[in-house]
Amino acid sequence: MEIRWLEAFVAVAEELHFGRAAARLRLAQSPLSQTIRKLEKELGTTLFDRSTRSVALTPAGHAFLPHAHRVFEELELGRQATRATAGVVYGTVSIGFSGALNHLTLPPLTRAVRQRYPEVQLSLTGRVMTGDGVEQLEQGGLDIAFVGLPIDPSPVRTRLIGREPLGAALPIDHPLARESAIDLADLADEGFITTPAAAGSALQELATQACVKAGFRPRVVQEITDPYMILTLVSAGVGVALMSSGVAGIMPSSATFVPLRGEPTYMDHALAWLDDNPSPVLKAVLALAEEVLPTPER
């Protein structure tokens, strides 16, 4: 079995079209088809169902695809390892983050990586809630995720990087918008805008807990995955929201952030990763993160 056979298989599996796969590999379609047939003969099974109109993976093809991907992942790790012996940190790190909630933590890390390790490529994915981030880490889709604590029991490791009390995001024409601080119970009759509970949002869970502690369950009028869009909808007068205090500096012009009186409910921000991820570049980025995003004292 040759590497080029696997390259051909992965291209056809991802494109599900021999013509597009051939163009991607800069081959004629006939040699590509011959290569796939050689691989199928080597494996003793059919990898694709072919017709004049479509190409689809067989069950055997579906089963083989993650192993083919793993071969190329191992080759990339080997490439990184050889560069590391020369003192060069090289490779790609995929990072998931929620958006506005990480505006004080994501930029210092990405800026430091670009300055310290210019050959490292950053693959950034936004609108990643805590539950989604943990799941993608477990499945190998992300190397690092910005999450809220606590998380459910998981092989994922976390490190606290920030603590911010929850406060209220209000439209500027709200009766309480000019107060220096308010009681959360004052918002019991309001409609709330939240991140989706189904996405495993730590912010949504904390906000609900804080409201219940204040004596009411929040009436949710809108769910949306993008935290900054929550602020935008507050600005538009759709409802109010509970957000961590870090967003106070990025409020839209028609919204304001008001602190809450009483015992604070803290949003604990953390980095999450898998210990058994073998990527040398991940270890370098995590070490750098300890410099630029140290764990705060509780």
Image (cartoon, helix red, strand yellow):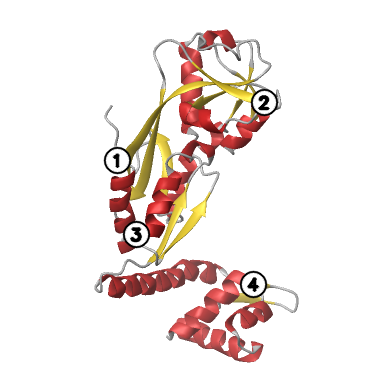
Q: Position of residue 109 (x, y in %)?
A: 39, 49
Which three-letter amino acid code belongs to the residue tagged 3? Arg
Q: Nearer the viewer, mark 4 or mark 2?
A: 2
Q: Is residue 51 visible?
A: yes
Q: Residue at x 60, y 11 (%)?
A: 176
Q: Are the residues at dot 1 and dot 2 in contact (C-beta closer than 8 Å)?
A: no
Secondary-structure class at tag 4: loop
Distance between the alpha carbons at the discs numbered 4 and 3: 40 Å
- Horizontal arrangement in the rendering, residue 153 relative to residue 211 (left or right): left
Distance between the alpha carbons at the discs numbered 2 and 3: 39 Å
Task: Give whichever of discs 4 and 2 has the lower sequence position.
Answer: 4
Vertical side of 57 occupied by 117: above or below: above
Distance between the alpha carbons at the discs numbered 4 and 2: 48 Å
Task: Give whichever of discs 1 and 2 has the lower sequence position.
Answer: 2
Task: Give whichever of discs 2 and 3 has the lower sequence position.
Answer: 3
Vertical side of 159 occupied by 276: above or below: below
Secondary-structure class at tag 1: loop
Task: Give whichever of discs 1 and 4 has the lower sequence position.
Answer: 4
Q: What residue is disc 3 on?
A: 116
Q: Residue at x 30, y 73 (%)?
A: 83
Q: What residue is disc 2 on?
A: 254
Name, please, the residue furthest toward the right: 53
Q: What residue is disc 4 on?
A: 16
What number is the disc on residue 294?
Answer: 1
Distance between the alpha carbons at the discs numbered 1 and 4: 46 Å
Which three-letter amino acid code belongs to the residue tagged 2? Ser
Q: Position of residue 168 (x, y in %)?
A: 54, 20
